[in-house]
Image (cartoon, coloured by chain):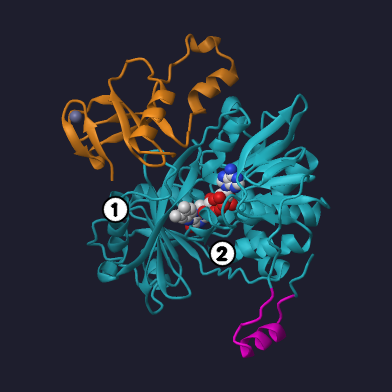
Amino acid sequence: MLLIRCPYCGDRDEIEFAYGGQAHLARPAPPAAQSDAEWGAYLFLRDNPKGVFLERWMHAQGCRRWFNVARHTVTHEILAIYPMGTPMPDVALIAHQARGLMGGAR
Amino acid sequence: MGHAPRFSLWSLARNALNHHADWPQQWRDAAPKPSYDAVIVGGGGHGLATAYYLAKQHGLGRVAVLERGWIGGGNTGRNTTIVRSNYLWDESAHLYEHALKIWENLSDELNFNVMFSQRGVMNLAHNLHDLRELSRRAHANRLNGIDCEILTREEVAAFCPGLDVSASRRFPIMGATLQRRGGTARHDAVAWGYARAADALGVDIVQNCEVTGIRRDARGVVGLDTTRGSIQARKVGLVAAGHSSVLAAMAGFRLPVQSHPLQAFVSEPLKPVVSCVVMSNAVHGYISQSDKGELVIGAGIDAFNSYAQRGSHPVIEDTAAAIVELFPQFSRVKLMRMWGGIVDVCPDASPIIGKTPVPGLFINCGWGTGGFKATPGSGHVFAATIAKGEPHPLAAPFALDRFSTGALIDEHGAAAVAH
Ligand SMILES: Cc1cc2nc3c(=O)[nH]c(=O)nc-3n(C[C@H](O)[C@H](O)[C@H](O)COP(=O)(O)OP(=O)(O)OC[C@H]3O[C@@H](n4cnc5c(N)ncnc54)[C@H](O)[C@@H]3O)c2cc1C
Ligand SMILES: [Zn+2]
């Protein structure tokens, strides 16, 4: 089970949270101007890395606020937590720092 | 090639007298060659079946299956082995029924006992909505020539006497559908049976060989980089289940697939007590009993993306609660083992079979929580797709481009409970 630090409420069990999938998806505008392929990509294509993933969580049983998380999809380590609306962090940098943190190759 | 002699009553008896000490090796542990006509990436049931049909039905002489670990070590060897074809939409019904028909003869065809047991699959209804949804699906199945019966509460109790059908349950059982031709099979035997039969036709099954890169030129795919050297091939089939997105990224495209852990567990062996497969969407649980007597119990996925091949404890707790709701007498049964697999979940709960943006590179993935049942049919239609370069008619609706045309095949009802 994950221990997730809600930026507003502090450390809580994973069961208090709802998962929101990939973060930083921007709805292309205007929708009618998009090709089928572009619109399909926006609706359905997702990153699915084996490594650091930028994702959204919501504190469903608490403050009900959304926030972003950088989490490693193999170790499940939470490497960064940052507010919605902030620019996408540098995943390579986070992955690099995680490697240092975990003391070696991963 | 084809070293392994056929199994027969005589060979079983002779080896029994010998204390099973000198069974010959059943397939070669092949080393990779520098080039092949077709290479299949992923030695699960779907990949091995694809290789078998490529060699058997399409006469491809030089075929290899590359597996990063051991064959059947992925979801094929981790699933709860439920086989059924009672899907809602025509496209899926035809595909899964195609597979079920192959299952019915598979042990004979492979000369390997896959222990296919048509003990019946029961889907329970706990409320009026369930009843309506299940009867809609049952009628759709019958229109597609697929056997499906609607059972009353009393008929449910008679078919599976261990179930608690009393009206006082929190989620009372109001009825069910029953597919009598559904059931279970032995997961490892499916991988081994296809491996052995493919090997006998000359297919190289290469284990401990991870694909690390996909090479292409202007015309399309030209080969693969692996941990055992590079391999040339102008036809490549990706059949890597939970790792499909990782392989797609090597070829430069994205998939609508997300990887999640899915768990299962088995109990201590008990005397026969669950005679069929029982599944319930409403409480979210599915259970059957293995020939050894273990209760085989399947859970749901963890909501978050993961490649860790292990799931969370809250999911186990929910699943145990669901099973105890159906069978209160199991509350003190001890669990012996639990494990997880990484499943490749698609937005419409249907697989992706067909071409990719890279010519010569084909993909078969997105089976998510329920692809074991499709193994023979999936391999069969995917082999035809690779050999001809055009989708097999049963595979055509499952092409990757349905996510831009909008022709989704929404099977969230038939696949609501992970299985
Ligand atoms: C707990 C659980 C219960 C389930 N229950 C059921 C059920 O009851 N009924 C049902 O129908 N389905 C069920 N499923 C789903 C079913 O197991 C899968 O859909 C099916 O087995 C997928 O088969 P496969 O051959 O495509 O994948 P896998 O067996 O996972 O094979 C893919 C292979 O690809 C290999 N691979 C990955 N990356 C690489 C690489 N880079 N290079 C080389 N090889 C690579 C992997 O090691 C793996 O062996 C369940 C799954 C789980 C996890
Ligand atoms: Zn909070």
Determine if residue B240 is in view.
no
Q: Nearer the viewer, residue B54 or B29?
A: B29
Tell me the shade of chain B. cyan
Amino acid under label 2?
Asp
Magenta region: which residues? Answer: B6-24
> Could you tell me which secondary element the residue under label 2 belongs to?
helix
The residue wearing badge 2 is B188
Which x, y percent locates residue B67? 61, 51
Going 22% across and 32% down the picture, which residue do you hit?
A5
Q: Which chain is orange?
A: A
The disc placed on residue B318 is 1
Protein chain holding label 1: B
The image quarter containing residue B373 is bottom right
- Give me the C-alpha separation between circle 2 and circle 1: 28 Å
Comes first in the chain, label 2 or label 1: 2
Seen from the viewer's position, the closer of residues B407 and B334 is B334
Where is the N terminus of chain B found, in terms of image quarters? bottom right
